[in-house]
Amino acid sequence: MTKQWTTRVVPLVLAVALAAGLGMAADPAAAQRLPGTGKTLTFSFTNWTGDWLPTMVSKVLVEDYLGYRVEIVDLTVPVTYAMIAAGEVDVFADAFFPNQNALLRGYQRDLEVISWHYTDTVRGWVVPTWFAQEYGIETIQDLNDPQIAKLLDRDGDGYGDLYGCEVGWTCYDQLEFKLQEYGLNRLYRQIDASEQMVNFAVQGALQSGQPVLFYGWTPDWLFAVYPYPDVVTILKDAVGAWPDDEVPNQYGFPPGRAGILVHRDFQRRHPEAYRLLSQVSVPLEAVNESVYRQVVLGETSDRDLERHAREWIEANRQTVDGWLKAAGLR
């Protein structure tokens, strides 16, 4: 989901009004002067639908219970790391690893992950299950067949199409590494397109029963609409080639995990926000649901995205109250 704005701001007054309108009033202590009153925190959003729920849950909590004003800025991942290190951005609420390991290592003197959301995500090369069964495709290595590549050539350029990631995303480089490592680059080309364009192409192929090869991951909506292994098959990787020292799973990719990234000086500058955000942990199934609601149901407005967060907070009130208590807000 691409947003064409540079900043996205929902003031505290509107946040509290929305909460009241939904029957989810902010904490009574909000009537007092809170430690973040008059202060602004800047959060980064990196043009990934999976970013939204962790970002908005974090935003709502620091606004409602600490009084901060939160501004969300649209940045690329490398710029996000550089801006946090420079003190221009405060929080990246959905840093994803191991894809961003190299960036974190590069800024390890300045940045730290203070909380983890989810772990053990699934990633891999995916084909329709009927296609895998009909042509006996079980592994990535089974794709090394000119006839299979021809069937997967959707744009007619003589190469099989792998719907992968945008240039600039770490997964683009990871897929290029595997194409070259397995000699598949002589038969296939990775399609460089936005997440939205890839989703559109993949959904069209799956709905019409056409062969398609794509890189799938969680959190995402595709596996909710087209579950594996019934509708789609994630190909195993019998070799497990990987560009660094991470250990790949049976699908050839290390399990992913997401966390909250801040500057190492954040605790000193915003101690209450540090204590609260250190407790925030949004589970994978909740993020999957949010992505589904955005992409499939079209719930992408500012109001929708904040509503997703507030509904999740209320549905998990005991968990959230535990975070608040641990942060000294209960």
Image (cartoon, helix red, strand yellow):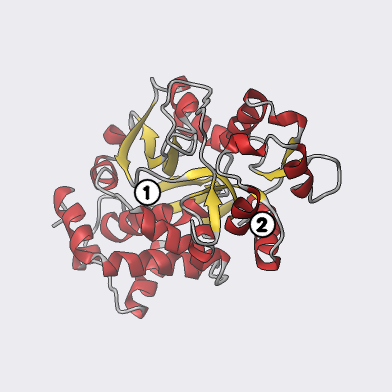
Residue in front for this viewpoint, 5 or 171: 171
Q: Residues within 10 Å of mark 1 (few under 14, many from 20)?
A: few
Q: Which mark is residue 39?
A: 1
| Quadrant hosting residue 211 | bottom right
Amino acid at circle 2? Val
Q: Is 15 on the left or on the right of 318, as rendered?
A: right
| Quadrant hosting residue 205 | bottom right
| Quarter that holds the C terminus | bottom left
Identify which residue is drawn at 57% across, 70% down. 298
Residue 196 place in picture, x, y as percent:
65, 55
Q: Which mark is residue 71?
A: none
Q: Residue furthest right?
A: 157
Residue 85 shows in the view: yes
Q: Which residue is mark 2?
A: 202
Residue 119 place in picture, x, y as percent:
35, 43
How many callouts does the rendering have?
A: 2
Q: Is 278 on the left or on the right of 12, as rendered?
A: left
Label 1: state its secondary structure.
Answer: loop
| Quadrant hosting residue 160 | top right
Amino acid at circle 1? Lys
Residue 260 place in picture, x, y as percent:
37, 41
The correct choice, above or below, for 16 with respect to 51 in the image is below
